[in-house]
Image (tube, coloured by chain):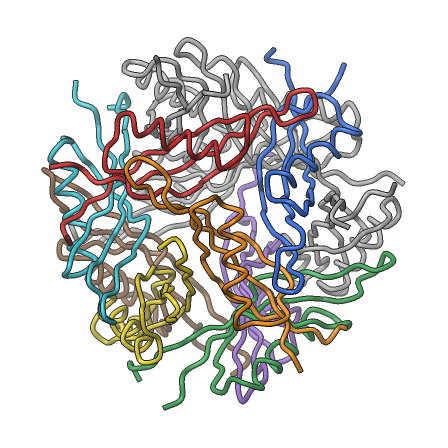
Chain colours: A green, C purple, D blue, F orange, H yellow, I brown, J red, L cyan
Amino acid sequence: MSEHVYKYIEITGSSTTGTDDAIRRAIAKAGETIRNMHWFEVTDTRGHVVEGKVAHWQVTVKIGFTLED
Amino acid sequence: MSEHVYKYIEITGSSTTGTDDAIRRAIAKAGETIRNMHWFEVTDTRGHVVEGKVAHWQVTVKIGFTLED
Amino acid sequence: MSEHVYKYIEITGSSTTGTDDAIRRAIAKAGETIRNMHWFEVTDTRGHVVEGKVAHWQVTVKIGFTLED
Amino acid sequence: MSEHVYKYIEITGSSTTGTDDAIRRAIAKAGETIRNMHWFEVTDTRGHVVEGKVAHWQVTVKIGFTLED
Amino acid sequence: MSEHVYKYIEITGSSTTGTDDAIRRAIAKAGETIRNMHWFEVTDTRGHVVEGKVAHWQVTVKIGFTLED
Amino acid sequence: MSEHVYKYIEITGSSTTGTDDAIRRAIAKAGETIRNMHWFEVTDTRGHVVEGKVAHWQVTVKIGFTLED
Amino acid sequence: MSEHVYKYIEITGSSTTGTDDAIRRAIAKAGETIRNMHWFEVTDTRGHVVEGKVAHWQVTVKIGFTLED
Amino acid sequence: MSEHVYKYIEITGSSTTGTDDAIRRAIAKAGETIRNMHWFEVTDTRGHVVEGKVAHWQVTVKIGFTLED
Amino acid sequence: MSEHVYKYIEITGSSTTGTDDAIRRAIAKAGETIRNMHWFEVTDTRGHVVEGKVAHWQVTVKIGFTLED
Amino acid sequence: MSEHVYKYIEITGSSTTGTDDAIRRAIAKAGETIRNMHWFEVTDTRGHVVEGKVAHWQVTVKIGFTLED
Amino acid sequence: MSEHVYKYIEITGSSTTGTDDAIRRAIAKAGETIRNMHWFEVTDTRGHVVEGKVAHWQVTVKIGFTLED
Amino acid sequence: MSEHVYKYIEITGSSTTGTDDAIRRAIAKAGETIRNMHWFEVTDTRGHVVEGKVAHWQVTVKIGFTLED
């Protein structure tokens, strides 16, 4: 197991609902092309404001995944 | 559009419900005096603990807005 | 009151529900051995991904508490 | 002179020309409402990309100014 | 109390005496226009040197205050 | 629009002319393989010195782009 | 001597007098339960403001100590 | 040579031997798919502890490489 | 497993041999009083120099461990 | 070549023209006393504002150079 | 005046009295070999603890000075 | 002893063997011109990659030394 090598991508998910949902969407989108994702770390939490209200929540996550052999 | 100039304020919203709600309250309060808010960025997430439970969630956001002509 | 001295612990709470719940669990666990907790600050937000979905949300908080006399 | 007290604002200037021009525009805009600006510090350099080219350069500066008596 | 919203200003106080006095002067100056200041945080400690001695101590503080209703 | 998911690449452009030109070249090179680039952020500004003069300006940018459907 | 292992605690001292006194009080309080303290590092300098004046100075220090055998 | 454009990947190597070996393994794994690697920078050094001993050393490196024409 | 709560200690190990050995000694010392250590992260690498040579390597690690029920 | 040892100086160049020119002047001034400069990294970009306009651009660079044998 | 070029040194002053005095001693020592010092910035505040009390206050400052022609 | 004043240099050592050896070489080189070195702190760990392998390890250290009277 000491042979494991992790790679990373950074991706921003967007949601009209809230921060947790924005993270779930980022993971789901990344999962369309990456298998074997293991963990994520939040690196930035932002959002768009339209007419005085939060219109979109945007959370950037760094995702670690292992390469398949 | 290249003429746009953004200014910023930093404000802490408070909620008994959770972090997303604290952000919504910060945006709402800022909106009482600022028009044309465009985006926010979370800079700090804290809270008060009373009798072993989270009593208030406090999230600080930096809000970018354009000046009205 | 100027005599107050605060100490800190850092602790990671885990939840299958979301980030706010992970914070609540960290506070609850700390409260089993520490009395007089006053505030917390989020220092890290991470999570485990299993089969392309967030399996556990893990939030690290730094908790400030006063010593009892 | 030891009585000087500085205040700060943070502002983003935008330009289609380049980074130095974006800074000049931020200073010019701030100067419409603030007198006695003394110095600035660049805190962020970004830009928008349209059709594969830099469309706007956006530089954020923190400006220090003294209050008029 | 969960409704509290904090705003911030950043201000540099100057003193010929020392760092603590520079902080006191920053707070005093801010108090001329802001009521309901609650706390401050030191963000920068600098000074001017004239003829090989510290001529002015300059301390920058970020001050949190609540808005009056 | 709340469905937007951004990905990032980090790339260093090089120029004998100056920093803005190094950024333009980084964007141009990235545009050879990436469509739908939206924004960039400067993360590092360096350069090589040859015989006491700046020979190459090297600016690293993080570029955000959306995935095409 | 190469066997020395240091542990750390983080503690906030409070004073009505100034920042140096707040540090002295943090060290004194820590010394009630920890022997063999060797050094400290200031990690945060804050304070409470009451009626426009600094009411309490609060300095957080990280203290390194060796374990007794 | 002023035309050089560098891209980056971030990768974590793992070793049961030590930190330098973990770096060598990260470089070796990256080299299976990337040619023209030029330099690396260590961004994180961690490890797993099993039964009170370091079981795996994990070092994350950011690798810069040039694109082949 | 979602119930896991991690706590942390920060500890500096010292060695006359090198950085990896200093980490091993920090883990070994921590293991005398803490069970269920899971991982470590290097937060500082320093050393003492005596007569122009490295006399002791000192590496500070933050160790995460679970509480036993 | 593995024997190369780099030293560093940090220096601020000033220009009435712009940021790139301020960097060139910093390098030129350093070159009066240092030979074998290899690279620079920008660590701070500031400027003085006089009568509402940028009067001097000030860029601080860290310069790496090798020692001559 | 736009020709001004600043250089920097970093130096730690020590005092048995307090932090401000440690800064004064650092400036005084630097002044023995450097003329034309203009400003300083505090980069680190530490101290030694002997028998449960602060024995020496140690403050590190970065000093900017101009070169004499 | 409270009179001690420390100065610092930053230097990068290079080795074909590993990170610890690069540190030893940086200290040795600095020792050719500086006496009374007391401690070092690692500020950067990098390396050159040639043909897919680590060719040189490069570690930057900040060295503290006292001035001789």
Q: Is residue J60 or residue H37 the one in the foreground?
A: H37
Name the quadrant containing residue H53: bottom left
The picture quadrant where one finds residue J9 is top left
Above or below residue D13? Residue D28 is above
- Which residue is drawn at the image coordinates 67% and 47% (left, top)? D16
Residue A57 appears in which quarter of the rendering? Answer: bottom right
- Left or right: D11, with L4 as reference point: right
Q: Nearer the viewer, residue H29 or I52?
A: H29
Apparent side of residue C16 relative to residue F12 in the rendered image (left or right): right
Q: Position of residue J11 (x, y in %)?
A: 39, 30
Residue at image position (58%, 47%) is D45
Is residue C50 positioned above or below L20 on the image?
below
- Asked if A65 appears above or below J42 in the picture, the reply is below
| Residue I50 in view, yes or no | yes
* Residue L1 picture location, percent across and down: 23, 24
**Viewer-proximal residue, A65 or L54?**
L54
Residue L5 position in % (x across, y down): 28, 25
- Residue that appears at 66% across and 34% down: D24
Question: Could you tell me how many numbered marks the image carries?
Answer: 0
Residue A24 appears anywhere in the view: no
Residue C22 position, x and y percent, is: 61, 71
